Image (cartoon, rainbow, N blue to C red):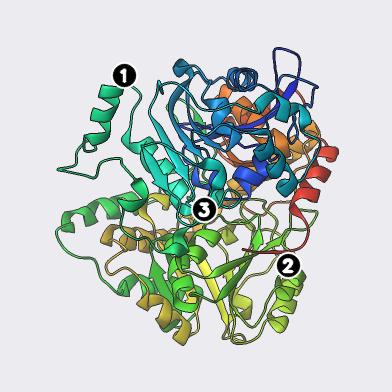
């Protein structure tokens, strides 16, 4: 979306709402995508919320002949904040972005982290060298406006500087300061230390009551963080913290669906019905034994689940929701040097669990219909691959994998590579051609099924899921479990839920009927919603995602936005769905097939090794 500067220039920005939004300002000859998206910053800030902007003359923003002084570029940022409805923000900048943000009035900022910049002036020669390195369009007007600019005066809000030790452009960065190690100007922005220091800085310092004078600022730097008996001073933050595993450098944060008082929550794929008959009573009775450890092996649940699914008990591994079991699976087969192949966009826990294990991720784009491309998945397998993840129905887009294409995948993947079929939404599937993993399990020792009690059974708050696999695989998964992780209440609630299978099916049928109604209504409004076999629909809103989510919120509905891609909307009860459909109907410019084509072009292509 665009804000309009005082001189009429269109300034591109993207706003993802959150509780502590961060304004991200890129450097000279770059743009928001290269500086913040491609380096993992947007994932790191997902829980905070953010506004990312292309400065005038850069990226998708207008490119007028003038207006490139730090003061005027700062006025452009204020126009963006006003358009986004944000009065104050935290700020992270890189390189020239720091010169611009330095000009922001203190009433619009809480705290600032300035990367890749020191106290030396930005010379014309420096700017020309940066453009020669980064390429792009002619930025001579910007060079004219920025040459000679430098950070001067006293900071009026808390500021942290961060530079690489090999960054010749950022000499003289003052305290408080964090070293980014042996990084130079063109690779320091992706540093894990940079992200970690910024997030810690935002957590530890509050703008309320901040005194701008130099003496008060020095006192604040010496004061331990609130609640610490004697924590580290701000100082050189890069030398304060213990050494953290480098495998965690780019682990994205899991972003839960938002909740809000008085708002309809259609953001987390939760069941709109309360617990099944008898479940609440049994769970309440189990609370009387809270002073006892739960059954480590979940013996009773395992036996009843084995009977219900018609599989041997030693094929089962119980865990803390399907996400917890997924992490156990990844830990059991993948480590440093291995590759995990999965579709993207798909379940956001896949890159998280893979990177935590130290393995490399291989993301295979969806096809033009927001479906998994299983042929491309198999082609991405290499001798380093130890795990292939298949989500059906796919979260967040909705289509289910078909039986024939899954059978073909199993024939193409080597037998020593584990294939996980994530069936969290299997109870909602009505397509007769869709895969059911149980049909393939006996013949494929390298197949593992992942299921949950969170969705159809409505036990999301108790965290209980399970894997179904051949005994050697199931045993390895169980070894990676946190001891006593699944509570007695969760185990007994799951058992009682199995006893209410008929009631569960009736409720799922009601959700499926509403799913059909919601999708048909959206199609009628002009939204190109793909097929869905889950308890949600996918609206591919592309660059308008934040705007669509904000419009829904203003109408009293919370949906789950995926920045730059689309919104996932849970199927709720009829009244909740009607409220959402009214909100979608009232959006100024519904997404058209042109926008769907743009989303397809952005998300479909060659797979990525990261």
Q: Nearer the viewer, mark 3 or mark 1?
A: 3
Judged left or right of residue 226, residue 108 is right
Q: Nearer the viewer, mark 3 or mark 2?
A: 3
Secondary element type, mark 1: loop
Judged left or right of residue 391, residue 606 is right
Secondary element type, mark 3: loop
Q: Nearer the viewer, mark 2 or mark 1?
A: 1
Which circle marks residue 166 in the picture? 3
Give the residue displayed 75% in from the left and 48% down from the top: 530
Give whichever of 401, 453 is nearer the camera: 401
Q: CA distance from mark 3 to mark 2?
A: 52 Å
- Asked where in the image residue 36 lies, by quadrant, the reply is top right
Secondary element type, mark 2: loop
Residue 280 spot, x, y in % from top left: 32, 49
Which circle marks residue 402 in the picture? 2
Mark 2 surroundings within 10 Å by alpha-carbon count, few (fewer than 14), some (14 through 19), many (20 or more):
some
Residue that carries the numbered disc 1 in the rendered image: 213
User: Is label 2 in contact with label 1 (beta carbons under 8 Å)?
Assistant: no
Residue 409 spot, x, y in % from top left: 71, 76
Q: CA distance from mark 3 to mark 1?
A: 32 Å
Mark 1 surroundings within 10 Å by alpha-carbon count, few (fewer than 14), some (14 through 19), many (20 or more):
few
Judged left or right of residue 479, residue 442 is right
């Amino acid at each position: 979306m665009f804000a309009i500067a005082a001189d009429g220039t269109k300034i591109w920005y993207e706003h993802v709402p959150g509780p502590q939004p961060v304004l991200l300002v890129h450097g000279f000859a770059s743009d928001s995508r290269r500086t913040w998206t491609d380096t993992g910053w947007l994932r790191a800030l997902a829980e905070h919320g953010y506004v990312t902007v292309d400065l005038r003359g850069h990226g998708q923003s207008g490119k007028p002949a003038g207006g490139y002084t730090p003061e005027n570029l700062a006025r452009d940022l204020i126009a963006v904040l006003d358009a986004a409805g944000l009065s104050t923000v935290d700020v992270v900048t890189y390189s020239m972005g720091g010169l611009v943000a330095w000009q922001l009035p203190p009433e619009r900022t809480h705290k600032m982290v300035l990367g890749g910049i020191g106290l030396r002036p930005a010379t014309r020669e420096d700017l020309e060298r940066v453009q020669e390195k980064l390429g792009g369009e002619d930025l001579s007007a910007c060079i004219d406006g920025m040459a000679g600019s430098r950070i001067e005066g006293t900071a009026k809000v808390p500021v942290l500087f961060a530079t690489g030790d090999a960054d010749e452009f950022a000499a003289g960065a003052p305290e408080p300061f964090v070293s980014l190690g042996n990084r130079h100007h063109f690779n320091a922005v992706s540093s894990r230390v940079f992200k970690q220091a910024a997030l810690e800085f935002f957590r530890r310092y509050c703008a309320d009551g901040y005194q701008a004078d130099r003496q008060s600022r020095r006192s604040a730097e010496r004061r331990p963080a609130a609640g610490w008996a004697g924590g580290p001073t701000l100082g050189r933050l890069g030398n304060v913290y213990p050494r953290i595993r480098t495998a965690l450098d780019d682990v994205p944060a899991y972003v839960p669906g938002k909740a809000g008082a008085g708002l309809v929550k259609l953001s987390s794929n939760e069941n709109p019905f309360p617990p099944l008959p008898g479940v609440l009573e049994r769970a309440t009775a189990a609370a009387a034994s809270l002073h006892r450890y739960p059954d480590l092996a979940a013996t009773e649940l395992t036996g009843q689940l084995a009977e219900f699914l018609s599989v041997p008990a030693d094929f089962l591994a119980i865990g803390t929701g399907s996400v917890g079991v997924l992490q156990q699976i990844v830990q059991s087969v993948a480590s440093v040097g291995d590759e995990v192949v999965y579709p993207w966009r798909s379940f956001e826990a896949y890159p998280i669990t893979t990177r935590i294990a130290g393995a490399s991720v291989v993301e295979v784009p969806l096809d033009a219909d927001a479906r998994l491309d299983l042929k491309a998945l198999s082609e991405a397998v290499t001798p380093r691959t130890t795990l292939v993840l298949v989500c059906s129905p796919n979260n967040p887009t909705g289509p289910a994998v078909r039986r024939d294409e899954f059978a073909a995948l199993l024939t193409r993947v080597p037998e020593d590579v584990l294939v996980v079929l994530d069936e969290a939404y299997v109870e909602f599937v009505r397509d007769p051609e869709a895969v059911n993993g149980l049909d393939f399990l006996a013949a494929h020792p390298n197949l593992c099924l992942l299921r949950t009690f969170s969705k159809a059974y409505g036990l999301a708050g108790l965290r209980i899921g399970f894997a179904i696999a051949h005994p050697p695989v199931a045993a390895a998964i169980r070894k990676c479990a946190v001891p006593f992780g699944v509570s007695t209440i969760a185990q007994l609630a799951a058992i009682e839920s199995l006893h209410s299978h008929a009631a569960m099916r009736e409720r799922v049928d009601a959700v499926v009927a509403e799913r059909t109604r919601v999708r048909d209504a959206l199609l009628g409004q002009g939204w190109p919603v793909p097929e869905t076999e889950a308890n949600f629909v996918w609206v591919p809103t592309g660059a308008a995602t934040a705007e669509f989510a904000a419009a829904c919120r203003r109408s009293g509905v919370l949906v789950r936005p995926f920045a730059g891609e689309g919104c996932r909307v849970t199927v709720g009860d009829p009244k909740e769905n009607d409220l959402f459909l009214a909100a979608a109907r009232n959006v100024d410019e519904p997404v058209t097939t042109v926008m769907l084509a743009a989303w397809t072009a952005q998300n479909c292509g060659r797979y990525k090794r990261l």
